[in-house]
Image (cartoon, rainbow, N blue to C red):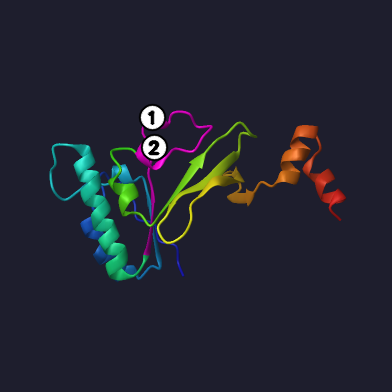
Amino acid sequence: GDWITMSSAEGKSFRPSEMPRLIRQYSPHLVLIDGFSLMTGDTRRNQLWESIRDMSRELKQLAVGMGISVVVAHQANRGAANTARPPGLHEVSFGDALAQDCDRVIVLSQPTKPPQTLTVTIQKFRKGRPLQTGTDFLFDPDHGRIKEYDERQRAASKSGNSRADLQERSR
């Protein structure tokens, strides 16, 4: 299928209530939302966390009702300033309603490893077990690549061995 990007760059933010029409129009199997807190709720609330809660519930109902997967990128709160450890469910920005509504919460953290390495942990898995120990991945955004960073690569980087040396030894 085609990759379709909808942007709020035109100065108007997306509302969860607009999504059912777009989903019916384009019939995606997966919806990705980059920057959940940039969306706008349909009702005015006194507190931002109330808007986040309402939008979270709307997205959950959308996913279940339309039978699609929705992946939402969101940030941790200031309490999770230590990026060497993964933020916990209680550190979701603007309250924990989003984490409560999610079937899975996948977290990125940046321990003291090579700068392009992020650790991915699963803090919540509604119908399974969380993976809180994590898996390391090398991110290369300049080339659009993500790959698992395994123990052999970690050992090679500590000893100063290059990737080519590692490949040669594994043959």
What amino acid type should be assigned to the residue bearing mark 1?
Gly
Residue 82: x percent and y percent?
A: 48, 29
Report if residue 87 lies within the magenta region: yes
> Regarding mark 1 in the picture, which secondary structure is present there?
helix
Residue 137: x percent and y percent?
A: 61, 46
Can you say which quadrant of the picture contains the C terminus?
A: bottom right
Is residue 12 visible in this depiction of the protein?
Answer: no
Q: In the image, which residues are magenta?
A: 69-92
| Callout 2 touching callout 1 (CB < 8 Å) | yes
- Residue appearing at x 34%, y 48% in the figure: 99
C-alpha gap between disc 2 and disc 1? 8 Å
Compared across the picture, whether 47 is left or right of 127 comes to left
Q: Where on the picture, by quarter, is residue 156? A: top right
What residue does disc 2 label? Answer: 76
Compared across the picture, whether 155 is left or right of 92 comes to right
Compared across the picture, whether 97 is left or right of 111 comes to left
Residue 60: x percent and y percent?
A: 29, 59
What residue does disc 1 label? Answer: 79
Nearer the observer, 114 or 87: 87
- Residue appearing at x 38%, y 29% in the figure: 79
Is residue 109 visible in this depiction of the protein?
Answer: yes
